[in-house]
Image (spheres, grey):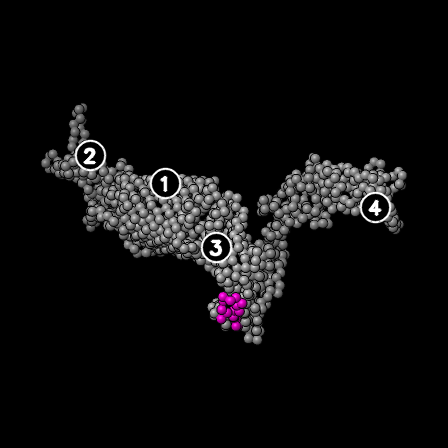
Amino acid sequence: MNRRSEKGSSTATPKVITCAGRLAIALSGATMLAGVPFTALAQDAEPDADPAAEAPSAAEQQPATEPAPAPPPAQSGDIIRTISVSGSERLEPTTILSYIRLRVGQEYTSAAADEALKDLGATELFSSFSIRNDNGNVVISVTENPVINRIVLEGNRRLDSDKILPEIKLSPRQIFTRSKVRADVARIVELYKRQGRFAATVEPQMVQLPQNRVDVVFEITEGPKSKVRQINIIGNEKFSDGELRGEMVTKQSRFYRFFSSNTSYDPDRLAFDQQKLRQFYLTEGYADFRVVSAVAELTPDQEDFIITYVVEEGERYKFGDVVVESQLRDFDSDVMSGNLAMQTGDFYDAKAVEDTVEQLTELAGRFGYAFADVQPRFNRNPDDLTMDITFILRQAPRVYVERVDVNGNTLTQDKVVRREFRISEGDAFNSLGVQRTTARINSLGYFQENFEVNQVEGSAPDRIVLEANVEEQPTGELQFSAGFSSIEQFILAGSIRQRNFRGRGQTIGLSLNYSQFSRSAQVSFTEPYLFDRNISSGIDIYRRDFNSFNRFGGDRNTTFEQATTGGAVRVGVPLTEFMSLVGSYTLNYEQVSLDENIFFSDIDGDGIAECDPLLAGRFLCDALGDRLSSILGLSLSYNTLNSRLRPTRGRNVTFSTEFAGLGGDQRYLRFRGRAQQFWNVANSGFIFSVSAEGGTIIPLRDREGEGVDDVLLTDRFFLGEPQFRGFDLRGVGPRILTQPFSFNPATGMTDLDEDGNPIVITDRDSVRDDALGGRNYYLARAELEIPLGTGARELGLRPSIWVDVGALWGVEQPILQDNPNGVQNVDASGNPLFIETVVVTNPDGSSTVTQVATINPIAADGVTENIPSIRSGSAIREVFLGDTPSPRITAGIGVNWNSPFGPFRIDFSQTIRKVEGDDDRTFTFNVGTQF
């Protein structure tokens, strides 16, 4: 911006100081400031101005051969009588005058005018401005910078606009300034560098609009992503390059790391990797280790980086004397020294030192010393390569909780937050209570993630204030989902739930589910603190329709339909901080029915159709009918998991029992147990978990009859997919395989093999498979979740390897059918029926051969034997299999993926051990979506 000062006669020519320049029509090229291109067009000269006056300085007006004259000394000017502003559009004249220091009554001088010009320029509100003095009447002429209409990003394909726009300073309705443009260009380039795109360039352009408005366009050329081709390490002798690269976050670009974003070059990550190297060596005892240099060089093709580290490992140290000096009266230094994890002679480990400091601080906090200070003092002995460490536990006052403050909650009532506190006002401070409070409030799910209770000094050194600064988040959920499962085929579901109803912490919900084989609807309500006491209560009302099935070959065939209408009430009380007891009462009305057209027949020949055990199975026929179940339940739970949704550490153990028989038609005792344990393996991201569960049913009523089980089919346990991966749905446990004989209806006899034995068809595609369930089961699982790179984690991929072990058994063996020649039909009196071939004479004289049912084994001619009338499909052999506690074992790999279509789970499994009759499956998947 050019500034010019003119001095004329005091009588005719006004004194003018101008700053001329018109706003750029298009920003192109590159300026000397941060490479931002601008093209400036000089403002046209005023008609009455001397052309020579447009030169920016007196020196530029002189010939090149003449020296520039010295500026004249400052002279006193006129007294300012008035100050006016011209050219302002958006800004008020009074606002513009407030930016300068010229005032009416002051003396007008060149120095004062220059200062005013500097003040106007510093505002960055004007594209040009000037000051003119006409005999004491000062006129300030300005041309305002344009207003930004919108910001446009062009060419950004790898970095979304919603990630760039929040990082830049310019925004719509702001005043356009060049300095902000330069800063935004640098910021966008920096964002691309953090993505590893060091060839990215940004050119700002400006589009002039009416009413002094502009569109600012950032034209982005992203360039290729710069990968890390090679990581070289020089100076390492104790550890290999591969071991050290494994400790770094930055990884070498390889084809199998296509999901990882850590293969791109990032200067911040380079500095972090140096720290990771130092931490690794310090944990291995190399206390003198240092990174001499770390250099990243672009390859000659300008596409990738080669990183070279030069390191000095130094000598390996061992722990010398390790003691604790406690200045707190409640702690004995000798006792604490004897309980330290590190011992003299162990190799030095900086991580162990940090952990000890945290443990001592935590220990002091549990005894009320909130501001305990633990300082390790090191004494290095280079002669014998030992490191003496003294942990000094400095004197601190015992602290009491002065006040508990809850801030930021607008919907949630204070009591909902306060009742989760494990430490109250007036109590001695306890860091364990604060940690548990933080975990309980986080588990509510009402507030921001990673909430922490803040500790603030109170009104005295021995007082502390606990602050719960919460940020509420939406707790209402409206969800519709659709998906496809290898088990249930197409699935539709919808639910609405409010987890913080009326800000009282109550949960109310409604859910509907529909699939090809099941339908359900449920309304539920939960009150976590009944009558403001630490007693939880809830009620559920539901309707569930389920179509059971058997297998015939590879097809699933619907057998019985079970409709359950009922409700449950529950009450829970905490026994300890981590243990709770829940009692419940459930009342169910169950209706079990079969398709009479398929599974019913006239067995006795009396014209009355009834359930045919040959078609449906004896256990299924026993389960038909309507019944009322009245069930009392009791559950004991111990839970230390750090998350209910995706735990990474902790334990969950649950024992439950159910008694059916307080009225109703069913009488049994059911016991179940389940235990889970999670570990974050060495804080490496690997999550290892084991779980075990089991159950048994004890009947309390004897159902008389040989081959009749005292527990109905609908009350038994079933095991298979999805609980037991690697097996089909209900693929484990007792079952009946119904194998047909090769039967010839023309002769009424079964086909025989060469040895004269009946031919039975054992091919599973021709065999009916009826799962019977069992009274007892167990299932154990071990799983290791494998962490992936940042890119894969952002995609929501969580692979794992697993092993499952389980079994199902304990059903009464039924009476099995073995009828090579089938079951002969009978009449209403129980007489066996035969098929007789007779000739019928028609009215036209013709004759027809037909077959009729008769009780006579010999035809009317007294010679021919009639063929027995065999019930269709009764030439079968039933085989009872799978009723054994012998373990079934499967192993496999699986992947959880939070895909754009919704949660997706896929498993590939290998059956290691199974029992004859079990149905295994190699591949299963489940996918759904939300909209």
Residue at horizontal 73 percent and vertical 40 percent from the top? 95
Q: Which label belongs to residue 542?
A: 1
Going by the numbered disc 3, the residue's amino acid type is Ile
Query: Mark 2 or 4, which is nearer the eye?
Result: 4
Which residue was labeled with disc 4? 110
Are discs 4 and 1 less than 8 Å apart at CB?
no
The answer to which image quadrant residue 106 occupies is top right
The CA distance from mark 4 to mark 1 is 89 Å
Going by the numbered disc 2, the residue's amino acid type is Gly
Q: Which comes sooner in the sequence, label 4 or label 1?
A: 4
The CA distance from mark 2 to mark 3 is 76 Å
| Residue 552 as seen in the image, left or right of residue 786 | left
The CA distance from mark 2 to mark 4 is 124 Å
Tag 1, which secondary structure? strand
Quadrant the N terminus occupies: top right
Q: Which residues are magenta?
A: 319-334
Q: Residues within 10 Å of mark 3 (few under 14, many from 20)?
A: many
